[in-house]
Image (cartoon, helix red, strand yellow):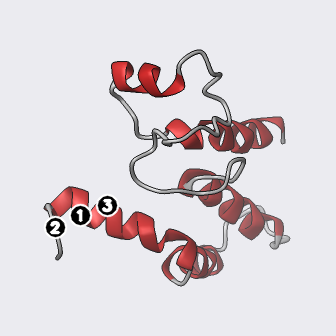
Amino acid sequence: WAAIVGAVVGDAAAVPSHWQYDVRKLEAMLGSSDPAFYAGVPKPNPFYDVPIGANSCYGDQVATLVASMASSSSPEVDRAEALERFYQRFAESADYASMVEAKRTYAYGGDQ
């Protein structure tokens, strides 16, 4: 459990500066602030904007898989059930609409 909790909390702490690899730009934005749970403006994360303390899609993937595993009495992952949970969380969720659009724009250079 400790590894799962650590992964989810670490993910939430890193969300504000996630996907920012320009060290000089990150240092300029953060100043002397602690990057964990950074709440300054502008946010260094260029791809999505979730509330401070919320998970990224990576933390949501962990939580979705753990929920699926916890719902089963079998030691095996029920792939169909897990896939349905992932579909509901990511494909049908408005939470990820802006991230999907940002990725499309970044990856393809515009509307696709």
Which residue, given by chain and number where applicable, does mark 2 sit on? 110
Per the model, the C-alpha gap separating discs 1 and 3 is 5 Å
**Cβ atoms at labels 1 and 2 below 8 Å apart:** yes
Characterize the local packing of mark 2: few (<14), some (14-19) or many (20 or more) Cα atoms within 10 angstroms: few
- Horizontal relation, residue 10 to residue 40: left or right: right
Which x, y percent locates residue 82? 63, 73
Residue 88, placed above or below residue 37: below
Q: Residue at x 63, y 35 (%)?
A: 38
Three-letter code, disc 2: Gly
Three-letter code, disc 3: Lys
Q: Which mark is residue 15?
A: none
Please state, as top left, top right, bottom left or bottom right, where the C terminus lies in the image. Answer: bottom left
Per the model, the C-alpha gap separating discs 1 and 2 is 4 Å
Which x, y percent locates residue 110? 16, 67
Which residue, given by chain and number where applicable, does mark 3 sit on? 103
Q: Nearer the viewer, mark 3 or mark 2?
A: 2
Q: Quadrant of residue 98?
A: bottom left
Q: Which mark is residue 105?
A: 1
Please state, as top left, top right, bottom left or bottom right, where the N terminus lies in the image. Answer: top right
Counting residues from the N terminus, which is met first, the one under dot 1 or under dot 2?
Answer: 1
Secondary element at image label 1: helix
Three-letter code, disc 1: Thr
Secondary element at image label 2: loop
Q: How many marks?
A: 3
Residue 22, placed above or below residue 32: below
Residue 60, placed above or below residue 1: below
Residue 63, placed above or below residue 90: above
Which x, y percent locates residue 19? 41, 40
Camera-nearest residue between 98 and 80: 98
**Cβ atoms at labels 1 and 3 below 8 Å apart:** yes
Q: Residue at x 79, y 42 (%)?
A: 5
